[in-house]
Amino acid sequence: MARTYHVYIMSNRHRTVLYIGVTGNLAHRVHAHQDGTGSAFTRRYNVTDLIYAEPYADVDEALRREKQLKRWTRAKKLGLIRRQNPTLQTIQGPYG
């Protein structure tokens, strides 16, 4: 069975902060951010809402995409997110 990797974007409740990451287990990673063990940044800025995710079969491709998105402007990131999630609603599990 092939593994799926995700490039994901999370935000805080007010959508003032965007966090981009990559993971091989999206459900576990989202839960880690929500319970405060995901990263110091997400804990500090209360980043708990998954608002965007892209699946990849290849981890190197996912890592390249993560780096690409991190270089984008906030406006460009929001444009990408809104194409999949126009109202920036929290994506509910199961993730995959």
Image (tube, grey):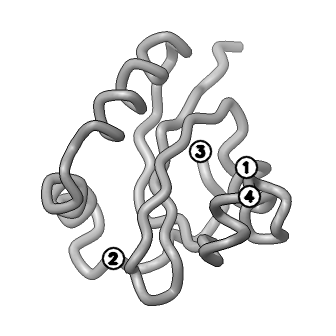
Q: Front-most of 88 and 68?
A: 68
Q: CA distance from mark 2 to mark 4?
A: 23 Å
Looking at marks 2 and 1 on the same chain, the residue that comes earlier in the sequence is marked by 1
Which residue is situated farthest in the bottom direction here? 14
> Which quadrant would residue 83 be assigned to in this image?
bottom left
Quadrant location of the N terminus? Answer: top right
Q: Which residue is mark 2?
A: 88
Q: CA distance from mark 1 to mark 4?
A: 14 Å
Quadrant location of the C terminus? Answer: top right
Residue 79 versus residue 20 in the image, above or below: below
Count neighbours of disc 4 (C-alpha within 10 A) and say few if under 14, some if 14 to 19, many if 20 or more: few
Residue flagged by tag 4: what amino acid is it? Ala
Q: CA distance from mark 2 to mark 1?
A: 19 Å
Q: Which residue is mark 3?
A: 96
Residue flagged by tag 2: what amino acid is it? Leu
* SS for callout 1: helix
* SS for callout 4: helix
Residue drawn at x 39%, y 80% is 15
* SS for callout 3: loop
Q: CA distance from mark 1 to mark 3?
A: 12 Å
Instruction: Classify residue 65 as left or right of residue 50.
Output: left
Count neighbours of disc 3 (C-alpha within 10 A) and say few if under 14, some if 14 to 19, many if 20 or more: few
Q: Report the number of numbered marks.
A: 4
Q: Front-most of 7 and 40?
A: 40
Q: Which residue is mark 1?
A: 29
Q: Which residue is mark 4?
A: 40
